[in-house]
Image: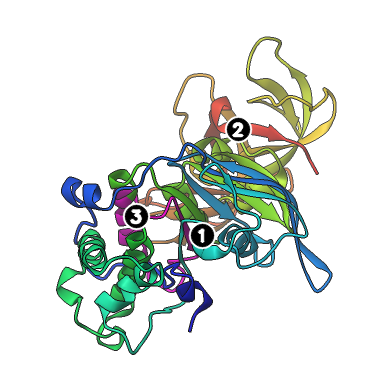
Amino acid sequence: MSSAAAQGLGPGEVAASSGADLASSTLAAKISVTPSGGGVAFEGVTVAYKGNTVLSDFTLTVRPGEIMAVIGPSGSGKTTVLRAIAGFVRPVSGRLCAGGRDVTDLPPRARGIGMVVQNYALFPHMRVADNVAFGLRARRAPEHTVRAEVEAALSMVGMSSFASRYPRELSGGQQQRVAIARALAIRPELLLLDEPLSALDAQIRQSMLEELARLHRSLPALTVLYVTHDQTEALTLADRIAILRDGKLVALGPSRELYQRPPNRFAAEFLGRANLLSVILDTPEAGEDNATVRFGATQLRARARAGIAASTSCLLCIRPHDLSLTAREPGANSLAARVREVRWKGELHDIALEAEGQALRLTTAPLRRPPEPGTMLSLYFSAADATLIPES
């Protein structure tokens, strides 16, 4: 028996096998989540396994009703964040709060949390309805309440007609929907999703992202902590993103802002593809959110960042899709680059180039006449799309 299921936390992976909507206002009212006003808070949390620190002095606040994505490479501590707040690992130091309560010492079932993990963890000997009811029955809910909540939860995920089936009679996507229903049936204040879409193909993954967004709109008081290694999922779904590296929080911010203005090199490289050009900061313009930099002999303009001193080396971050072959506005930055390779990827051309001995990439809509390797091109970009970040 899964430890998550034993605590009524609703394990399983989230997926979609059809385009059915997950929610309606009527069903959302049946599975209501009462705003607690407390959200989730990690206060200086450190977790160690056998003497090895896997999460170090981790501090993060997730607002009530917010979707927070936690991303990072393998071994960065992402899943440990979820296991700590769920109660499956105990911190060696620090404090955990959920729903306005200190839950550091509470057992998992007392935390009011639903959890959906990567693998299919439905009980094979139980029908769908019994799987969804498991957490409620573990809490000794009256049977009439169990029936009502199971019906509402299955309706939320479009699985009402499958209530009498066994997991082996469902597709992987359908099993994942059942796992979500089980997590929602206990009316959690907090829903934990641990890389729920990692095993799905691209089309189903995109469909599921849209359905998760609709689900959250139907349950706006539900706080969601979403762990993923997929940056696209995080950018698509999350209100804010936390980036971990080696057990430490290295970047945090609203999704769009973190993508457009990464605070450091690791965040820029990990959250989507980025061109990082070594430049020299001449002078930031007083009172304006831009600066003049030197890229070889070329002068460029970019958005300034506090803490980078004039005449020092830094990195100019430009996303590949923000480069263009024609100027999109008067006074746009321009630099010369030589084509190294052109790849057609169906809906776009991916062009590898070199400028001043540094590599960069441009992505553009398919070109009728793509440039040949060796061709010199002029690339254009707006100062608003170029951000300075520290070199280290």
Asked whether 201 falls inside the magenta stretch, the response is: yes
* 207 relative to 274, above or below: below
* Residue under pointer 1: 110
Do tag 1 and tag 2 residues touch (Cβ < 8 Å)?
Answer: no
* Residue under pointer 2: 386
Counting from the top left corner in percent of width and height, residue 162 is at 19, 76
How far apart marks 1 and 3 lie (CA) works out to 25 Å
Tell me the residue at 63%/18% (across/down).
Answer: 289
Mark 2 is on which residue type?
A: Ala
Q: Nearer the viewer, residue 169 or 9?
A: 9
Mark 2: secondary structure: strand
Q: Is residue 298 visible?
A: yes
Do tag 1 and tag 3 residues touch (Cβ < 8 Å)?
Answer: no
| Residue 258 sits in quarter | top right
Asked whether 258 falls inside the magenta stretch, the response is: no
Tell me the residue at 48%/19% (across/down).
Answer: 330
Residue 330 located left or right of residue 59: left
* 100 relative to 165, above or below: above
Counting from the top left corner in percent of width and height, residue 338 is at 62, 48
Residues in magenta? 187-215
* Residue under pointer 3: 212
Mark 1 is on which residue type?
A: Ala
Q: Nearer the viewer, mark 1 or mark 3?
A: 1
How far apart marks 1 and 2 lie (CA) works out to 48 Å
Q: Is residue 359 visible?
A: no
Q: Sequence-wise, which precedes: disc 3 or disc 2?
A: 3
